[in-house]
Image (cartoon, helix red, strand yellow):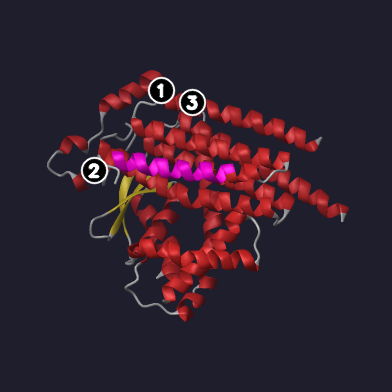
Amino acid sequence: MNNITFIQDILSNFFFIAGMFFVFLGMLGLYRLPDVYNRLHATTKIGTLGAFGVMMGIVVKLGFGPMGIKAITVGLFLLLTAPVAAHMISRAAHRHGVGLCEESTLDDYGKTYCPMNSSCAVKHEETIEDEHDQM
Amino acid sequence: MNTIHLLDIALIFMVLSIIPCIHRIIKGPTIPDRVIAVDALATVIVVMLGVYSFVQESVFFMDVALVISIIAFVGTVTIAKYLDEGVVF
Amino acid sequence: MKRYVLYSIALGFVWCFVHGVVNLSNFLIGAMIGPFLIRPFKELYSFGEEISYREKLNRIPKQIHYFSILIVEIVKASIVVAKIVLQPKIDIKPGIIAVPIRAKTDVGITAIANTITLTPGTLTIDVSNDKSALYVHCIDIDNAKEIRDSIKDDLEEYVLEAFE
């Protein structure tokens, strides 16, 4: 019996530390990556997995009591809504005129919704310049 | 003793994670950058509330975490719709 | 009527999970509140189509298989992006590519778009007007054809099995 508690302790602490480290990496990606879409990659994937990991740590430690079940609810909610929010905000950013960063190789989406006005499909140089100034 | 160490580690990590978010919110070159940063800040606060609820052994902070995640999602979608179409509804 | 029963059962489970205690009385309370919640938002639930319980039940093993694959993919995706973040000098070639899809129903398209967002290095931006292609932002394009093939062969098979 004591043995099982010990394994539970180690496993849940591992989940906690790994989850918080992943959240930290996601926020570091938010700081370091060059443009809106790449930052979305960092916060959507790594941040969500980190939050889910912390919630799994709580479940492993406490079992399926009231707190464990609420932790599962919060984790699943984050996992379900993060892709939807990322899709909405990236679509709005592209239509609002935020360009891709200068390392980008191709852009299939830009020519679909405004074929006449090509200025909104190409990269916006001033955005990139601003970014390089403040980095 | 173990749980106190856990709370310390969690708070240090989360404060370190909040610093880039604040930087993005203040200096982010475009509006979507700021929206993403607010969303990420909500995720960090949800994780913090989860750990705090576990350490304090109280269920109620988990309700707060659920409500904050719901409000962050609805706010992000609302601002995205406003940027895209100019109206919310 | 069948849809009211199905969604009431689902909402009963949601009520249990939000309440924190899963037992029969909580489930019944949630299932009884459910129809009053479904009624005002009727057009969101596509009441026009016919469904059968047997078909929904037959899909559950495939959906469990799909979710197990999804969890492995999410962990892989996070490690890929974490490696990119931890590089001393960030060296990436991002871009947006169009990926043709075979899914036809709205549920299938939503499922595959969310799956693409949670898998390595890709993020869905929009669906084309005729619902035949997705626009996907990739964090590192080596070979656009390879990414299209990997989405079509690996992920779309499971989504089509589970949700169409």
The residue carrying mark 3 is B22
Q: Is residue C21 magenta?
A: no
Badge 1 and badge 2 both on one subunit = no
Q: Which residues are magenta?
A: B64-82
Distance of label 1 from label 3 (alpha carbons)? 8 Å
Give the structural element (helix, strand or loop) at label 3.
helix
> As displayed, is residue A35 above or below residue A72?
above
| Camera sees residue C89 | no
Q: Which residue is at a point 31% across and 22% down the rendered structure image?
A: A129
Circle 3 marks a residue in which chain? Answer: B
Q: Which residue is at a point 50% across and 34% down the rendered structure image?
A: B41
Q: Which residue is at a point 44% across and 71% down the rendered structure image?
A: C4
Mark 1 or mark 3: whose residue is earlier in sequence: 3
Percent x, y of residue A92: 31, 41
Circle 2 marks a residue in which chain? Answer: A
Give the structural element (helix, strand or loop) at label 1.
helix
Distance of label 1 from label 2 (alpha carbons)? 26 Å
Viewer-side residue, B62 vs B4: B62
Percent x, y of residue C63: 51, 67
> As displayed, is residue C92 above or below residue B62?
above
The residue carrying mark 1 is B27
